[in-house]
Image: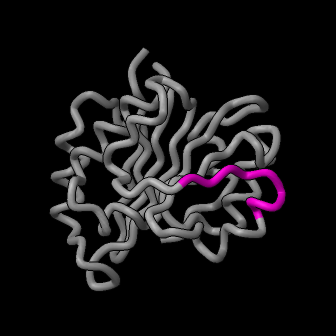
Amino acid sequence: MRVEASKIVSDLKLKPGVKVLLFGEVEPKILVSVAEAAGGFEKLLLLHRDAKPPQGARGFIEKGMKAQRSSLIEHNDFLPSSSFEAVLAQNVINKLLGRREFLGESYRLLKPGGRLAIIQRLWPLTDLRKKEFDNLINGARSFSKVESRIGLFSTYVVLERPT
């Protein structure tokens, strides 16, 4: 399933001045659209696990996107609560041990009314099965589900932190 960058921008309710937190290796076309909608690359923060940011993100860092290493993506105590209007996670859920903790951390970091968009490949492209992902999203009761599209090998979900 392919999700257009313009749909993600719309679903996240992005507008100039909003702060966006990114997890995973977000596609370049999506990064550009998100940055344009948010008012520039300096409004984006990419959290990554490795010593260096992902190769595909380095050119965007040169354009002003911030990148910070987080050895445990599920817990980021160095970031203040309610500090982002949007969180975008692409192909990162399957790499996490604390998947429920990740959703809780996303909730903590979002401002009330903020949205989390998850784009995720599923089995057999990763070890994450459709049923596991469904259970994870259905267990995220603190969020309101805005959209949930599950295809054969991927999924797109948008959750909102209630106001």
Q: Nearer the viewer, residue 70 or 149?
A: 70
Outermost residue, front side: 51
Task: Please state the horizontal and vertical placement of residue 111, each as a whole percent of the image.
Answer: 49, 23
Left or right: where does residue 93 sit relative to residue 129? Answer: right
Relative to residue 62, is residue 77 depicted above or below? above
How are the residues colored? one colour
Is residue 38 one of those drawn in magenta? no
Outermost residue, bottom side: 124
Relative to residue 86, is residue 47 depicted above or below? below
Q: Residue at x 20, y 51 (%)?
A: 136
The span picked out in magenta is 60-68
Count of residue discs: 0
Left or right: where does residue 48 sit relative to residue 122? Answer: right
Q: Residue at x 81, y 61 (%)?
A: 62
Task: Please state the horizontal and vertical placement of residue 128, each as a whole percent of the image.
Answer: 24, 71
| Res 30 quadrant in image | bottom right
Q: Nearer the viewer, residue 151 or 114?
A: 114
Left or right: where does residue 134 sit relative to residue 153? Answer: left
Q: Nearer the viewer, residue 38 or 8?
A: 38
Q: Residue at x 22, y 67 (%)?
A: 130
Q: Nearer the viewer, residue 76 or 17?
A: 76
Assign the C terminus to one quadrant of the image.
top left
Relative to residue 17, is residue 94 depicted above or below? below
Task: Please state the horizontal and vertical placement of residue 25, each as a whole percent of the image.
Answer: 54, 68
Q: Residue at x 62, y 34 (%)?
A: 13
Relative to residue 98, is residue 154 depicted above or below? below
